Image (cartoon, grey):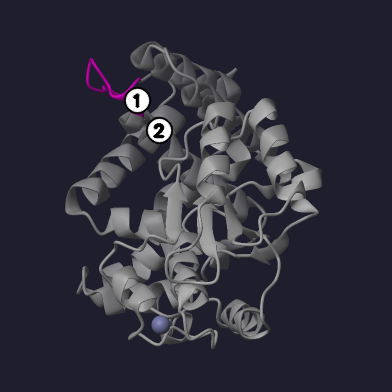
Amino acid sequence: MSLQNIAVGHQELKAFLLRYLQGNPQANTLLFAGPPGSGKSFFLKAFAKDFLCTKNSGVACGKCPSCKSFSMGVIPDFKECNEQKNPIKIQQIRSLQQDALLHPVYSNKKLIVLYGADNLTLEASNALLKMLEEPNLSTCFILETNMPDKILSTIRSRSVLFRFQPYSDRDMKSILESSSIEQDSTKINLIASLANGNAHRAFKLCNEEYFSKRIEYCSKFETIVLEENVIPEFPKKMEKNELNHFIFESQSLVEDSIRVSLNKEAQIKNRDQIQLIKTVAESFELPSILKLQEILLQCEQISDSSAVQTNKLLLKVMMDCKKSLYF
Ligand SMILES: [Zn+2]
């Protein structure tokens, strides 16, 4: 797909990207930054196809060898690294240095994408900086990141920044409608609101099983928060991703309760849980709800690290939540 075929979302940024492509781009480092699920990778791939087209018009022609091989997914001048967004070590940057030296096959320049570029070790960051300071004219790098502030400022300052914002609810609705994964318009409206601008979350919510888990977690959250002496039951061996899902849904409900406490009811995301959210907001003072939010945010940081006994952690979180509200 070419950028000009993307009809939904980030239309101003799209125009900016197209102008950049049509202006004979010379920069050797581009930064695609924005929150998770904001469409960075999707736009990046369309941009790459346009960039690599041998007609050099700024728009993919669809017919040249570069465009054809791009559509088949076998394009030699486009390399994507670290799609899993793992920590990036210095050896990986050294291997990229080798790739950067190779001549492009079809296009004037090769494109090398580094996903999760905020996850570079300091050593790797310095090696990357060194490589960018001695530009190789036949290679352009794209750094993709959710957290641009975590990238060395000296790398950021050398890069052309394209910043993505979360999708609007309206755009998310159009994306879901055109994907035809979900047909029910009421559910599409709810999912667009719940996704909060994150397309990854929206597509997960279209999955029946994930959606019913969410309902189950909302009800467990209700027990933890509103029934002083009851601890809900969870599977004895809870998977880490299930814990993360539960924490995420709880955070989202707490955020909505804060919205209600601040008289911003119109901005509620979990519209199907409005009664629960209002009850939480009416039952507790705002400082207690903010404390609850803090506990859940801390848990997100802990669960990111490995070797945590998930069930133990879950129990601790539930007890801490109760303490914050009842003691
Ligand atoms: Zn082409």
- Locate residue 289 relative to residue 156 in the image: left or right: left
240 versus 205 height, above or below: above
**Mark 2 secondary-structure assignment:** helix
- Locate residue 127 relative to residue 114 in the image: left or right: right
301 versus 24 height, above or below: above
Amino acid type at circle 1 is Lys
Q: Mark 1 points at which residue?
A: 240
- The answer to whether residue 268 of the structure is visible from this angle is no
**Mark 1 secondary-structure assignment:** helix
Q: Quadrant of ligand 1?
A: bottom left
Q: Name the residue under label 2.
A: 244
What residue is rendered at 75% in x and 40% in y?
A: 152
Main secondary structure along the magenta-highlighted residues: loop
Q: Where is residue 28 in the image (x, y as percent from the top left)?
A: 67, 61
Q: Residues within 10 Å of mark 2 (few under 14, many from 20)?
A: some
Q: Give the range drawn in magenta.
A: 231-240
Disc number for residue 190: none
Q: Residues within 10 Å of mark 1 (few under 14, many from 20)?
A: some
Foreground residue among 198 and 44: 44
Asked if the beta carbon under badge 1 is closer than 8 A to the nearest atom of ligand 1, the reply is no
